[in-house]
Image (cartoon, rainbow, N blue to C red):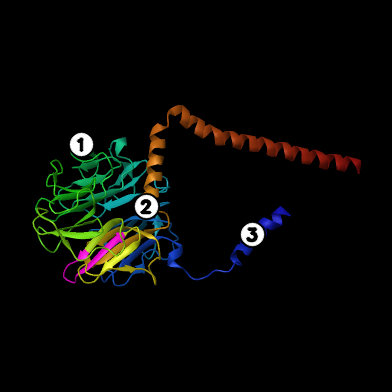
Amino acid sequence: MLRRFFALLPLLVLSLPAGGHDPSAWGGTYRTRDFGRSWLAADAGLFIGASLDVAVSPTDPHHLLYATDTRLLRSRNGGRNWVQEAPDIFYGPTLAVTFLDDGKGALASTAAGIFRTEDGVSWQPAGIAQSALPVRRIVAATTSGRVIALGARGVFVSTDHGRNFRRVATDLLPDQPASSIAIQHDPHESMWIVAGGEVWTSSDASDWTPRMAGLPKGRIETVFADGATPRRMWAAGNDRVFVSDDDGGIWRAVGSPLPEPGTVIREMALDPAAGTILLASHRGLLRSLDGGDTWELAEGGTLPVHLEAGPLRPDPHEAQTWYIGFSLMPYQELWRRAEQGSNLLTQLDPLSLAGLIAFPLLLLLVGILLARYLLARQQGRHAAGSYVR
């Protein structure tokens, strides 16, 4: 009877009714080629619970890396097809990913650490303190060889293309996760972060200076470098958008407050020429087409409804092309679970690891012995029946 049931199970599954894809039913990553006016799924055919990061190769717009809640994916044809990357390493949530400046090398983070590849084939662990794990965001500069990582506690910088990281400004920056990072395309490739709700900047990744004049103290959530106008920086938090035209010397509020108080802003993008502002928030994607005077929630159609928006990443080849990710589970919960997983990994000693391996082996051994016993018993009954006849 059981054999018949398992033989018919695939037919039963295939016979169940299936409807069209509902973007509200899953998370995932979406792409716009007109700066947020229209979006299409960049991972069609996949069922993603949470999009955690996406990166576009600086040398090939069709080469993507995609960090999800269950694996790391790679596409070499602009997202039409995806393959799982290094399943022996990335078999759980991949939290952050970035390409190096050569377009081949890349870095990706999990609860276990940061992993690095130079050829897109083999991945090796990077040198970073356990206190940094899990790293939520990794950004590589384009010319200096620096890579900055936002750790669970503090900010970590690499000056050798991501091979080794060291914590910076331990006496200044808060001992907690930084929420945002931006690289200003000036001669120094200045780095900007948001830590403890405040904006900080550094031109050499060592000395960091706060830039808070005109900003609400402790309330800023994200920062954005304006690539079109030198010295112009943007920031968002406290349900407002702010701009500075002098490298953060003085900030001023622009537009109107967001329609719903208490909106958590995770990422932002701007097209100042068109007056378009995009905000990835815990309510979804917020959009303004008039420089922030009015706001609307961009949802429905191809975008998920009532899902949190997280990563908002540019295509370095086309200014109007951006990617945005959504998650079924709150991002804060995903990061909390990743941090718990990282703590468990660091607490495993050799004795605990041996016990973890021995237990399933013991279950397997018991199963084999039980199966042999039942088989011998059944053979004995058949032999006895044949003898009687």
Residue named by callout 1: 170
Q: Secondary structure at mark 2?
A: helix
Q: CA distance from mark 2 to mark 1?
A: 26 Å
Q: Which residue is depicted at the point 30% across and 51% down?
A: 97
- Residue interval drawn in magenta: 270-280
Residue named by callout 3: 9
Q: CA distance from mark 2 to mark 3?
A: 36 Å
User: Which class describes the residues within 10 Å of circle 3: few (<14), some (14-19), or many (20+)?
Assistant: few
Q: Quadrant of residue 161?
A: top left
In the image, 41 versus 59, the foreground residue is 41
Q: Is residue 100 visible?
A: no
In the image, 347 versus 387, the foreground residue is 347
Q: CA distance from mark 1 to mark 3?
A: 58 Å
Residue extending furthest top? 351
Instruction: Say which amino acid is labelled 1.
Output: Thr
Residue named by callout 2: 331
